[in-house]
Amino acid sequence: MIPWIPLGTAQIPNNGGELKFSQRGDEFSIRLSGIRGELMNSRLFNSEKMLAELGCVYLKSTDNAQVLVGGLGMGYTLAAALKMVRASSQVTVAELIPEVVVWNQGPLGNCAKNPLQDPRTKVHVGDVRELLKIRQPTFDAILLDVDNGPEGLTQKDNNSIYSSQGLEDIYKTLRPKGMLAIWSAGPDHLFTVRLKKAGFKADTRIVRARPGKGSRHTIFLGRKP
């Protein structure tokens, strides 16, 4: 079997642990120290793609659309969002860890066909919460693949994004008819209730890690009236 080759490490702020980036043949992996299994694998990206497709479904005919992607990961959500919007649009991707951006600027970027090179892409290196608290109608779609969903895995601070206050901030940062889409490792009925209380028209979809197979993930959807 082809061995994994370490390519780099990165520290998650606020004692969130260490990310380990490695390659085996044409396959890439990002793991979190102390956690069994992978956070991301370059061959398992269907649910990340569906996050963007479901979140941007209403923007195909919208000129000058503004989309925010929270979490770069391996670039698949960003790449799918760019495919869903017009040439006049802009997709801002917020990534907390600078090394993840660097990895996507290298060979890893080829997996998602180098979305960082698209002229419509704007990179924000920092906490996505900085952009979620604008509280002025700014984005037509907000796509969040931050941590493990409504219950943070690497950083408990991320839970504030999905709190009632966090959802209120997001609601005010979305333009009318804007869409919020959130990737989650699993379902959470109480979070759906929270979305509705924040004013969103809420829905959930179950998607697979690979088309038709693999782990089941949940996409929470909230549309602003």
Image (spheres, rainbow, N blue to C red):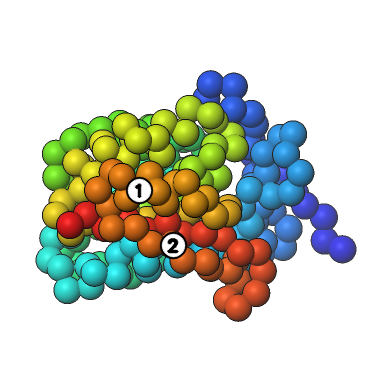
- Judged from this view, the residue extending furthest toward the right is 1
Quarter containing the N terminus:
bottom right
| The quadrant where residue 135 appears | top left
| The quadrant where residue 204 appears | bottom left
Residue occupying image coordinates x 34% and y 58%: 202
Measure the alpha-carbon separation of dots 1 and 2: 11 Å
Q: Dots 1 and 2: beta carbons under 8 Å?
A: no
**How crowded is the residue under tag 2: few (<14 C-alpha within 10 Å), some, or many (20+)?**
some
Tell me: 47 left or right of 117.
right
- Judged from this view, the residue extending furthest toward the top is 14
SS at mark 2 in the image: strand
Residue occupying image coordinates x 12% and y 66%: 63
Residue 225 in percent (x, y) is at: 17, 57
Is residue 103 depicted above or below 49 in this figure? above
Is residue 89 depicted above or below 16 in this figure? below
Name which of mark 1 and mark 2 comes first in the sequence. Answer: 1
Front position in the image: 197 or 131: 197
Write down the residue under mark 1: 195
Residue 174 in percent (x, y) is at: 20, 48
Front position in the image: 140 or 94: 140
Write down the residue under mark 2: 204
Q: Is residue 186 visible in the rendered structure shown here?
A: yes
Q: Residue type at mark 1?
A: Leu
Residue 172 in percent (x, y) is at: 19, 41
Residue occupying image coordinates x 60% and y 78%: 212
Front position in the image: 70 or 19: 70
Q: Is residue 7 visible in the rendered structure shown here?
A: no
Residue 97 in percent (x, y) is at: 48, 35
Residue occupying image coordinates x 32% and y 40%: 167
